[in-house]
Image (tube, rainbow, N blue to C red):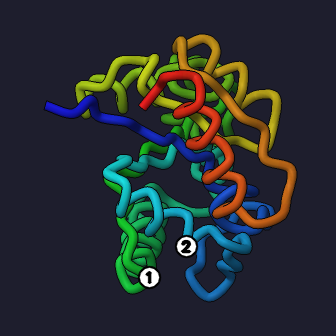
Amino acid sequence: MAVKKLCLLDRDGVLNVDKAYLYKAEDVEWIPGSREAIAWMKSRGILVAVVTNQSGVARGYFTEDTVRKLHAWMQAEMKKSGGEIAAFYYCPHLPGAAVKQYDVECDCRKPKPGMILQALNDFNVLPGNAFLIGDSSRDLESAEAAGVKGYLYTGGSLLEFVKSIVHDCEQHGIS
């Protein structure tokens, strides 16, 4: 049986343009090559999961239901492009939050590794068979804490970035 590979993506700044506290589908602006990258990974049998801090919930800007609805819409858009996101993981917590139920010191808020560890467990993937693409040091710190290789995305075509990562993994015997 083939080893499962898992690509973990930060959402804002990697999948879509980072707009402060994005929660409306009509405000989504895709990163160039993001939908194509998801479709390409699907065609290669690489699972994709999103791991994203969503402190707008804790700040009272929108609800968890709003986040789930946006993620369902994003998933539908990915499917239209031939891709699929296996799961969305989000952290609504923020120490000192305005919404008291989210005023929590948790293990899921990046740079802590909770969301990544949950995804690895849910999909039964070893850390060495996963990689994370993020746009901040916080993302890379969470990947390192989970034992996953992290890559810093700084712009350009996400498809080309993903292809270079997968090619690099293959060159080093990680299939």
Give the residue type at disc 1: Ser
Question: Whole-percent x and y of residue 5?
Answer: 37, 36
Asked whether 46 or 141 is in front, the reply is 46
Q: In this view, does 13 lie to the left or right of 54?
A: right
Q: Earlier in the sequence, mark 2 or mark 1?
A: 2
* Picture quadrant where residue 135 is located: top right
> Which residue: 49% across, 35% down?
101
Q: How many labels does the image show?
A: 2
Q: Is mark 2 on a helix, strand or loop?
A: helix
| Location of residue 69 (image quadrant) | bottom left
Q: What element carries label 1?
A: loop
> As drawn, is 8 to the left or to the right of 143?
left
Q: Which residue is drawn at 36% across and 60% down?
A: 42
**Residue, x 86% and y 50% (percent of image)?**
154
The answer to whether the residue labelled 2 contacts the one labelled 1, judged by CB atoms less than 8 Å apart, is yes
Tell me, for residue 124, which label it has, or none: none
The quadrant in which the C terminus is found is: top left
Report the residue that reaches farthest toward the left: 1
Please tell me whether residue 120 is drawn above or below residue 153 in the rendered image: above
Q: Dot 2, how many residues are within 10 Å of its Cα: few (below 14), some (14-19), or many (20+)?
A: some
Q: Name the residue under label 2.
A: 36
Q: Relative to 55, say whether 29 is above or below.
A: below
Measured from the top left, where is residue 45 in percent x and y? 31, 51
- Residue 86 position, x and y percent, is 32, 53
The relative height of residue 98 versus residue 77 in the rendered view (above or below) is above
Which residue bears the numbered disc 1? 81
Q: Which amino acid does label 2 sit on?
A: Glu
